[in-house]
Every structure is written in C-alpha cells, then in structure tokens.
Image: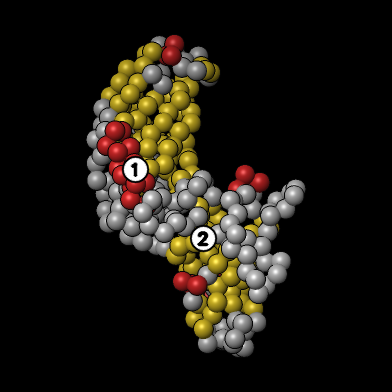
C-alpha cells in the first residue's frame, strides 16, 4: 500500500478511532508465544500506548508433571506489580494443557522505568498480591505496514520518492563533515489485522547502507498510525535516505514489498 498524503493517513486514523469507540475496549498490550524447539518457549510483549518492547523472554515450565504439555497461549496473561519507587516487577504466565492442574510457563522481569504501564482494576480476587492485569491480545495477525506520506527532513516536506535540496545552513548542527537535520514521518497499519510492536530504520544510500536512525514503534491497531522522528546526520552533496518499516521483519504482512521507501536529499554547502 502506498499512502500518498499525510491527510489520508490521519483521516484513516480518525475513522478507526470512531469505529473503536463503538466496540469493547482495545487491549493495552499484544503478545505472542513462540516454540523455539530445543531452545524452549519464548514470549514477546509489546504495547499499544508507546515503545514498550520485551522480546524473546525465556519461559520456564513450573508446577508441571513430567512433560509440560501444550501452551494455551490464548489464555496467557501479564501481571504488573506497581511500586512506589524503583522498577515495577512483572510476570508473564502461560497455562499449559496436559501437564497438570497448575502447570504453566512463567517468566518474571522488571519493567524499564519509562515503561511503567497504565494499570487496570482487574485485580485477581483469588490470588491476592498478584497485581494488576492489563488487557492483552494474542498476535500475530496478518496486516500491512507502510510509511505514509509526507516525510519531513529539515525544512523539506516531501512525498516518498521525491527529491529536495537543503542548504547546509538549515542544519541544526554541523560537525565533522555532517549536517544534522530533524526528521519525521508516520507509519500506517493499513490492516486488516493488528501489528505488534516493531522497529523502523533510516539508512544512507540503500537498505544495507549506514544506519542513520532506528526507532521503536508501538503495537498498532488496524487503520492507526505511529510517528517516527528524531535527528539524522547527512554529508554534504547528494544522498539517498531509505526508510524500512518493520526493519527486523517482525510483523506478518500481506505484502513485504512496500516496506522500503526513499527520498533523495542534496545538501548544498559545507557541513564542517
């Protein structure tokens, strides 16, 4: 999908918001449980409200009799323990069928300070002290991610595929032959499914070129957007800036051919 205008992306996002208002509350987090074979099971948890990423958490069987059986990943849950200070402890539980009444896969971890999630009122009455249980949705869904137009680099506002000339004097900083410019664009989940959290990259002169920026993206509901932005350093002269949505190839998509977009930037003047 090649979205041609920022207005279109925002209109889709607003439409999605209106539709969601008539349905049950959206989940706070998405998760998936992967069978790593001899490496065991691993969990990945991401959030809808920010760049909350906990990938490849090693799950350990407990309370199981011999063979732990099969994970009921659709019944998995995360429990968060709010603290007055310091990192918030969290647990991820995956019930197992065939391994005993209380058999489960389990991992305990601490949230990063900036990842303290919104709490809910869903306290488990049968397990006191087990904290809050945010709403969760199992993934992966099949969906389609794409970089939406326009992209802002320094003073230039471009459609993907365009080119622009930017004076070096417009850089926010010039040092060692590099000019530093702010950038910003939107990533659109065109649907039909949810997208778990992933990352997007900007590279110089090709998809395997020098890494300019790497941005974590939150999980996205269908027809919603996430902003990617920061600062990139470009040399004087002509450069191709390439964006790759879902750079780690993490999200199952209906099309993998539209994840690369590029613009040509000609920086005129000295960057020293």
Name the residue beneath numbered marker 1.
13
Q: What element carries label 1?
A: helix
Seen from the viewer's position, the closer of residues 82 and 182 is 82
From this viewpoint, is residue 259 visible? Answer: no
Location of residue 102 in the rendering, given as x and y in whole percent from the top left corner? 61, 82
Name the residue beneath numbered marker 2.
135
- Determine whether 104 is above or below 1 in the image: below
Query: How many neighbours does mark 2 have within 10 angstroms: few (below 14), some (14-19), or many (20 or more)?
Result: some
- Determine whether 30 is above or below 216 in the image: below
Seen from the viewer's position, the closer of residues 63 and 238 is 63
Q: In which quarter of the image is residue 129?
A: bottom right
Q: In which quarter of the image is residue 130?
A: bottom right
Say which residue appears at 38% left-offset and 13% top-offset: 167
Say which residue appears at 50% left-offset and 18% top-offset: 172
Query: How many neighbours does mark 1 have within 10 angstroms: few (below 14), some (14-19), or many (20 or more)?
Result: many
Q: Kindly give the residue lying farthest to the right in the view shown.
A: 85
Say which residue appears at 37% left-offset and 27% top-offset: 152
Q: Are marks 1 and 2 in contact (CB under 8 Å)?
A: no
- Determine whether 192 is above or below 148 in the image: below
State the colouring used for the structure image: secondary structure
Seen from the viewer's position, the closer of residues 27 and 66 is 27
73 displayed left or right of 158: right
Location of residue 230 in the rendering, given as x and y in whole percent from the top left corner? 48, 31
Q: Is mark 2 on a helix, strand or loop?
A: loop
From this viewpoint, is residue 115 visible? Answer: yes
């Amino acid at each position: 999908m090649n979205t041609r205008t920022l207005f279109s992306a925002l209109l889709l996002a607003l439409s999605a918001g209106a539709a969601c208002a008539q349905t049950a509350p959206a989940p706070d987090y998405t998760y998936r449980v992967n069978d790593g074979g001899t490496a065991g099971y691993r969990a990945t948890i991401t959030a809808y409200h920010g760049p909350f990423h906990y990938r490849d958490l090693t799950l350990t069987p407990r309370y199981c009799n011999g063979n732990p059986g099969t994970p009921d990943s659709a019944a998995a849950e995360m429990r968060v323990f709010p603290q007055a200070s310091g990192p918030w402890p969290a647990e991820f539980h995956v019930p197992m069928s065939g391994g005993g009444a209380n058999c489960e896969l389990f991992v305990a971890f601490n949230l990063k300070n900036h990842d303290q999630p919104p709490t809910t009122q869903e306290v488990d009455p049968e397990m006191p002290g087990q904290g809050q249980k945010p709403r969760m949705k199992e993934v992966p869904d099949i969906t389609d991610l794409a970089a939406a137009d326009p992209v802002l680099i320094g003073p230039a506002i471009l459609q993907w595929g365009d080119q622009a000339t930017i004076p070096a004097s417009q850089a926010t900083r010039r040092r060692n032959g590099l000019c530093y410019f702010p950038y910003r664009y939107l990533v659109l989940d065109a649907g039909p499914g949810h997208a778990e959290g992933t990352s997007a990259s900007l590279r110089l002169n090709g998809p395997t070129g020098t890494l300019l920026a790497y941005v974590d993206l939150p999980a996205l509901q269908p027809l919603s957007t996430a902003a990617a932005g920061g600062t990139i350093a470009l040399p004087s002269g002509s450069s191709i800036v390439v964006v790759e949505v879902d750079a780690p190839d993490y999200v199952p998509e209906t099309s993998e051919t539209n994840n690369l977009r590029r613009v040509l930037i000609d920086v005129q003047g000295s960057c020293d």
